[in-house]
Amino acid sequence: MKPATILIVDDDPPMRMLLERYLTLFGYGALVAADGNEALRIAGENPEVGLIILDVVMSGISGQQLAEQLAILLPNARILFCSGHPETALARMGIDIEGAQFMQKPCRPLQLKQRLSEMLAEAERCRSLP
């Protein structure tokens, strides 16, 4: 079975590199985007992306707005929102992630691995339903 391909979208270079390193160590394929435009281009060229790790607060387009656009290009991909801001601060900024998958940055490697595994397994279960 081919490893899942995961798209990382984060405007912080060290965080992108760290997440990419984690994904590689976990055995996933990793694609990396520094901003919304790059993420949309990569998503359009890689329909096999099964999961997106998306920074909530980025310069330019917000993670929430980008998620809506990526959902059109990759309707079967799951989205894991990440932020260095606590959820309460995101709410004060008008960002609504209630009901979404969310992890606080920086992520602990084993927590991230577990969450990705769970999300990808759930996506697979949903695809196998009649």
Image: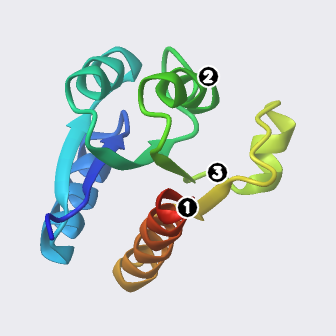
Label 1, on which residue?
A: 126
Residue drawn at x 25%, y 41% as measured from the top left: 13
Label 2, on which residue?
A: 65
Label 3, on which residue?
A: 85
Task: Looking at the image, tell me whether mark 2 or mark 3 is earlier in sequence order.
Answer: 2
Residue nearest the viewer, comparing 10 with 114? 114
Task: Looking at the image, tell me whether mark 1 or mark 3 is earlier in sequence order.
Answer: 3
Query: Considering the numbered disc 1 on the image, is that residue within a helix, a strand or a loop?
Result: helix
Q: Position of residue 43 (x, y in %)?
A: 31, 28
Quadrant where the N terminus sits is bottom left
Mark 1 or mark 3, whichever is nearer to me: 1
Mark 2 or mark 3, whichever is nearer to me: 2
Decide: few, some or many residues near mark 3? Use Cα within 10 Å; few <14, some 14-19, many ≥20. Answer: few
**Residue kind at label 3, given as amino acid type:** His
Q: CA distance from mark 1 to mark 3?
A: 31 Å
Q: Position of residue 25 (x, y in %)?
A: 14, 74
Residue drawn at x 58%, y 63% as measured from the top left: 104
Residue 128 higher or lower than 65, as above or below: below
Answer left or right for 89 relative to 24.
right
**Residue kind at label 2, given as amino acid type:** Gln
| Residue 44 found in image quarter | top left
Residue nearest the viewer, comparing 80 with 95? 80
